[in-house]
Image (spheres, rainbow, N blue to C red):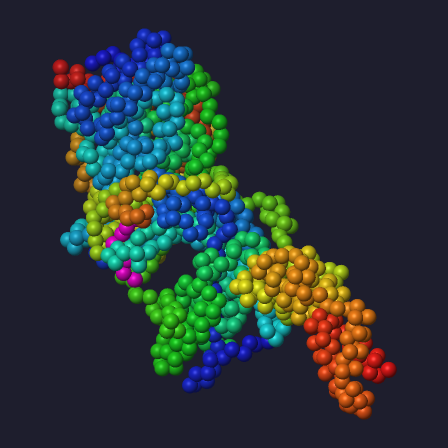
Amino acid sequence: MSALTALTIADARAGLAARTFSARELVDAHIAAVEAGRGLNAFVAETFDHARAGADAADARLAAGEGRLLEGIPLAVKDLFCTKGVRSQACSKILEGFAPPYESTVTANLWSAGALMLGKTNMDEFAMGSANVTSADGPVVNPWRRRGEDKPLVPGGSSGGSAAAVAARLCLGATGTDTGGSIRQPAAFCGIVGMKPTYGRCSRWGMIAFASSLDQAGPLTRTVEDAALMLQAMAGHDPRDSTSIDRPVPDYAASLTGSVRDLTIGVPAEYRMEGMPAEIEALWADGVRWFREAGATVVDISLPLTRYALPTYYIVAPAEASSNLARYDGVRYGLRVEGDDPAEMYARTRAAGFGREVRRRILIGTYVLSAGYYDAYYLKAQKVRTLIARDFEAAFESVDAVLTPTAPFAAFAIGEKMDDPIAMYLNDVFTVPASLAGLPAISVPAGLTADGLPLGLHLIARPFDEPTLFRAAGVLESAAAFGHRPPAPGEAEAA
Amino acid sequence: MSIDRDTVLRIARLSRIAMEEDALAPMADELNGILAWVEQLDEVDTEGVEPMTGAIAAALPQREDSAEDGASTDDLLANAPDADDGFFVVPRVVE
Amino acid sequence: MSAPGYRIQGREGEWEIAVGLEVHAQVISEAKLFSSAPTAFGAEPNSQVSLVDAAMPGMLPVINRHCVAQAVRTGLALEAEINLTSVFDRKNYFYPDLPPGYQISQYSRPIVGRGRVVLDLEDGAQRTVGITRLHLEMDAGKSIHDRRADATCVDLNRAGVALMEIVSEPDIRSPEEAGLYLRKLRSILRYIGTCDGNMEQGSLRADVNVSVRRPGGALGTRCEVKNLNSVRFVMKAIEVEAARQVELLEDGGAVELETRLFDPDRGVTRSMRSKEEAHDYRYFPDPDLLPLTLDPAWVDAERARLPELPDVRKARFMADHGLSAYDAGVLVAARGIADLFDEVADERDAKRVANFIMGPLFGALNRAGIDNEDCPVPADALAALIDRMADGTVSNQGASTVIQTVVSTGRDVDAIIEEKGLRQVSDAGAIEALVEQVIADNPDKVADYRDGKTKLAGWFVGQVMKASGGKANPRAVNEALRARLDG
């Protein structure tokens, strides 16, 4: 495997700018890696010709000294983003064959910053899942293994293909989307950085909707600095998205000063969950220690409604999804199963096109919005959501960031936790509260379990305070000095 | 509140998702499991609390009233499972 | 306010009706409510559809500022409360011409609250119909069932066009009042330019809620008759639906809350085929949109910008020009006509102007098949014609001919008068010569007249007019004859 695939985005930028290697060489190395890594099932579409053509154009720009922020950087794109002329199916059978005549704002922003698309990555169907096992394109294999075992593990989800691809060095970075933890939890499972910005920071235009009030795009990368660079290109106001916020995008990489002496980090007691593995508790304590050693003030805080976040999420998100997914009816695009009248055609199409978890969530969402139940479920959940957001507001009066574990356990084997939806939902117990409150959050790889699997620590910051989030995450990253890498697919075979 | 077989049938119809007869009862069990779990929200006092209507506090942006060309009819119909002479085609609606 | 007299005579006494209307008015705008696709009527199928209207994956709505302003203006014109915060909800249902599987509408928090419309009854009395609410929503596309025998074709050109749903209280007590209400509402919408009111093209459609009760009793169960596209159908549908309910009740039956369709050919309403299951629209706030907030200063500015509305104008026409309530009401109904009257009546004989507009002008428009609203006659042309009548240049009859030509050709009034030879002869010498000639030719009649058969005066006028080829000014002829015969 080429050393080019082991670079960070920051290093690759420097190398490209110095003409140490060309964008074409960088892209070719990654194409080889993607080909070697097909066994992970991380990619559902490969766009190598696009990437190569773009690389040549990037080299011309770089030669002319006109390289842009991500000039020549090969990335992967979650299949939830609409990419013009390229399959965009949310890994659902119901969008079979769908190639949109438009490009999502986030990916368009990346391309106009010079980035190149290697392909589309696998994901849980419509981003509904936490293990990448609900994909119509089959499960993704985590490049990590338990020490001494060869049992394939899940990469987390829903951005499992993106996380696996970045961890296995098939691309320098990837886009993900996070509704309740779909960037951060797979990042933790795969030992990489996953960042969800403030709701409204990245445009949702052209991103296939799961739950509109929660969905946010974000980067998956191998370093905090890379996440800052990618977000820099992805973020920005978009007048085509009514929930996109019109405020300037700060220089995120510049916020990585390495100092947290002026910061107060809050540790919420309520995240100490019953039955959480001791090694996660221990890692969390390490995180506290690292921040103290770096000069930050660490205080205990209370977020009393934390335990209600997950049930709130599992009312709000399915409710929105049940409506967002009504457009998949076999009329204008995607799968159609014929019927004698439209109602029958719809019912057959949607039964055949949606997988089990998606159908389950549509049914739950339909139920909680239906006459007689709306107040008891949906309205109640949106009120609790207000209280959860208030919890954070109160906490942020005295702290600058909140430190928690990213997930209550490490990656598990494909096939586990499949029988009990609630057990699967618990994956997101620590990531969902920030989603409900619309707050920026990041998972940083911080340690390994006893059997050698990565664990992440999770930071949450105030709305639009991504600079503080990146700054704290950078310090955490340095202190944790994670440094572990799974074998790249080629290496594994060679070994 | 508990979901029975008929309720599953009703919401499946509302959702336009065909379900086999023998799938109704197991789905009712699954949904009841989830509902029993989310009903812990009843413990939270939400008296006088406004429901959240958006994850961000901002004013609704408004667009100017200028018409641009719509998508080209070809683009619009390019992905359609059935189209005829500029129209989307669906099975006959029985009124 | 007198109790209106509409009663249905049942076998067992009288019934009265209570009717409320839900009017869907298409907002006049260039672009759609949540997309930038154009709104023009009658384009090629699926040629005015944005990716948003087609609900392509990942597409998002952004509201049209002008449509918001149009709804607020309409609310202000209905003297209604403007809600400074309103919310857009999704109304979820599946239909092939509803691409997202939901309609973006306003459910619990509409942009406009309670208002009113004042009706002018034929006897000069007034009745107030309460407005419950007005909200903004998007239209669906069109399903075409008669194009293919085996399938339904879907055209999304209308999908996403902005509609205002204007809901009245059940204050309407007769089919006639429903007609007056709809006409008055349409007049107001046209005055302020928020809806063209064109019922044939579907810019204005009404659903009527009809119930019957014993006079003074509690409201009965209502039925909704949907999608009526003319004033006449609204009135007829109410009449037949109310009669159906009375018959049903007197036969010991009960009215069921349901949606019905009006069949204009057979003059009956019929139940819509009962759906597999009751609708459950699962309204919830659209998470793609935030609450719509309005600046009170902006609302005040919109209020100040409103044109003079029909009721105020009517009162002014009565006060300033001494018109009857009826005449003033007729003149203000169409804004174009009221504007015409305003310009021409000033410094002229207002009653003459009013009579000419309501008589010959309306007749000419009617003959030409032109809606009063679209009257093409410019104010200076009407003013010139009124002046030619006043100074005797043309007769009333001649002026009627002239206005027809103005309506159909738009040509200059004086040119028409000359070309058609409608100029009256008022020259005293010429008329006296004609009078002399007639007297000389009819010595017997002159003798009879002078013997007391003064009724012959009319006959003499007729002879002189005839001799003049109809061009003599009748008043001048009359005066000259009397001077000669009586003198």
For the question of whether residue C331 can be seen, the reply is no
Pick whichever, C370 or A60, lies toward us.
C370
Q: Is residue C303 left or right of residue C483?
A: left
What residue do we see at 23% from left, 29% from top?
A45
Q: Return the x and y of residue B8 as percentages of the image width and height.
A: 24, 54
Up/down of C154 relative to A131, above or below: below
The quadrant holding residue C403 is: bottom right
What residue do we see at 72% from left, 73% from top?
C468
Pick whichever, A489 or C333, lies toward us.
C333
Q: Return the x and y of residue A323 as percentages of the image width and height.
A: 33, 47
Q: Return the x and y of residue A339 as percentages of the image width and height.
A: 21, 53
What residue do we see at 43% from left, 34% from top?
A200
Q: Is residue A210 left or right of residue C302?
A: left
How many numbered marks are there?
A: 0
What residue do we see at 49% from left, 44% from top?
C64
Pick whichever, C438 or C151, lies toward us.
C438
Q: Is residue B66 left or right of residue C332?
A: left
Q: From the image, which quarter does the N terminus of chain C lie in?
A: bottom right
Up/down of C109 relative to A443, above or below: below
Pick whichever, A335 or C436, lies toward us.
C436
Q: Residue furthest bottom?
A: C451
- Specify the segment rendered in magenta: B88-95
Please check the rendered image and state whether residue B94 is part of the magenta-colored stretch, yes or no.
yes
Q: Is residue C42 left or right of residue C364?
A: left
The quadrant holding residue C225 is: bottom left
Q: Return the x and y of residue A294 as percentages of the image width and height.
A: 40, 16
